[in-house]
Image (cartoon, rainbow, N blue to C red):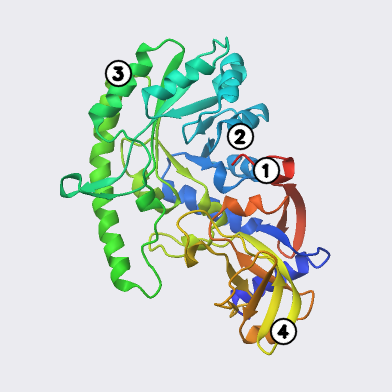
Amino acid sequence: MTVRAADRARYDRATEHLDAPLAIVDLEAFDANADDLVRRAGGKPIRVASKSVRCRALLERVLAKDGFAGIMSFTLAESLWLARSGFDDILLAYPSADRAAFAELASDPKLAAAVTVMIDDVAQLDLIDAARDGGTEPVRVCLELDTSLKLLGGRLRVGALRSPLHSPAQVAEVARAVVRRPGFKLVGIMAYEGHVAGVGDAVAGRPFRSRAIRLMQATARRELAERRAAVVRAVRAVAPDLEYVNGGGTGSVQHTAAEEAVTEIAAGSGLYVPRLFDNYTSFSGRPAALFAQPVVRRPGVGVVTVLGGGYPASGAAGPDRLPVPYLPEGLRYDPQEGPGEVQTPLLGSPADDLLIGDKVWFRHAKAGELCERFDVLHLVEGDTVTATVPTYRGEGHTFL
């Protein structure tokens, strides 16, 4: 029996009393992935990206482990909710325009001490000040550095369109604006190199593309390490008491951790290991989060149909944004239909061994987005569900 076949048998036994659709997290795999992230971080603390987990119980579980410290959140409303829930070190990874949440933040000492907001433009400070509604608590601020690689004199750009702050001088200028402005405290710098951390460099069947990606990433890492160090020097000249410099992501943990200027690493997807993280040479993880759909039809030989399953991930539309049939091995989508809103035909010889009511297990393309589809996660240890915990959605929150 293959490892995957053994996992399927375990998951089927663990959930035999539960009807699909359902989602699980294999805790042994989750913990092993956490340990691997810590190993790759080389002693630098890992700040957990909550958008990749979206479950308070699992955030608490990973933060209880040595090597993890703090949360990187994705909306201001989520940040305040987590702070009210007892998490005390939350870095908001994206700028916000949530005026009501800023008013709440600026009026509550506990929230203001726990949450750091992200900016890359002085206009964002104006928005926060206009939203205070009488709140006088100092707002903790982190500056985001643009990590994109610019070549050919800037005519070629590789990387996400995020911060406009690219050079040390640009970041230092905004840092001075924060320091001069009453009601704000500059505490950190964040730089997410998504073109390194979030792009696989071993694309199946594409050797030349994979080689080009590895070359680009090696060039980008060298350029960013030098520029990030210069940015940190420039900002520390303005704010000597800077608390942290955050960088990285699941796909670049060990490379970013090697930079002296970086004090902590951000990661989250590496806990669940969705399908987009199958194409890396720098690490391999164990799929920990899966969802099951029930077989509801047998249209013919070599075909079964499961209920639902059309859960595409965010990003540019394409086959890599679709979940993949994972267990039993050997199933594939009908190219004419793909994964559907209410039904998904699956082709392949394993279909002939599936009965009405059997479960087919899938992996999502991305990590936390799976939790937007399910109210609870069933936590599996061995061949037993040992706990059932709510996702953000199950607690009544869909922040984006």
Ranked by sequence position, the earlier of labels 2 and 1 is 2
Residue wearing tag 1: 392
Cα separation, mark 2 vs mark 3, equals 30 Å
Q: Residue furthest left?
A: 153
Q: In the image, what residue occupies the spot 54% across and 13% down?
A: 137
Ranked by sequence position, the earlier of labels 1 and 3 is 3
Please identify the quadrant where the C terminus is shown: top right
Cα separation, mark 2 vs mark 1, equals 9 Å
Pair 2/3: label in front: 2
Q: In the image, what residue occupies the spot 54% across and 57% down?
A: 313
Cα separation, mark 3 vs mark 4, equals 68 Å
Please, what secondary structure does the residue beneath circle 1 have? loop
The label on residue 299 is 4
Q: Position of residue 328 (x, y in %)?
A: 64, 77
Please, what secondary structure does the residue beneath circle 2 have? helix
Given contact means CB atoms under 8 Å apart, are the residues at marks 2 and 3 in contact? Answer: no
Cα separation, mark 1 vs mark 3, equals 39 Å
Ranked by sequence position, the earlier of labels 4 and 1 is 4
Q: Position of residue 169 (x, y in %)?
A: 23, 27
Residue wearing tag 2: 78
Q: Position of residue 20 (x, y in %)?
A: 76, 64
Q: In the image, what residue occupies the spot 74% across and 65% down?
A: 383
Please, what secondary structure does the residue beneath circle 4 have? strand
Residue wearing tag 3: 238
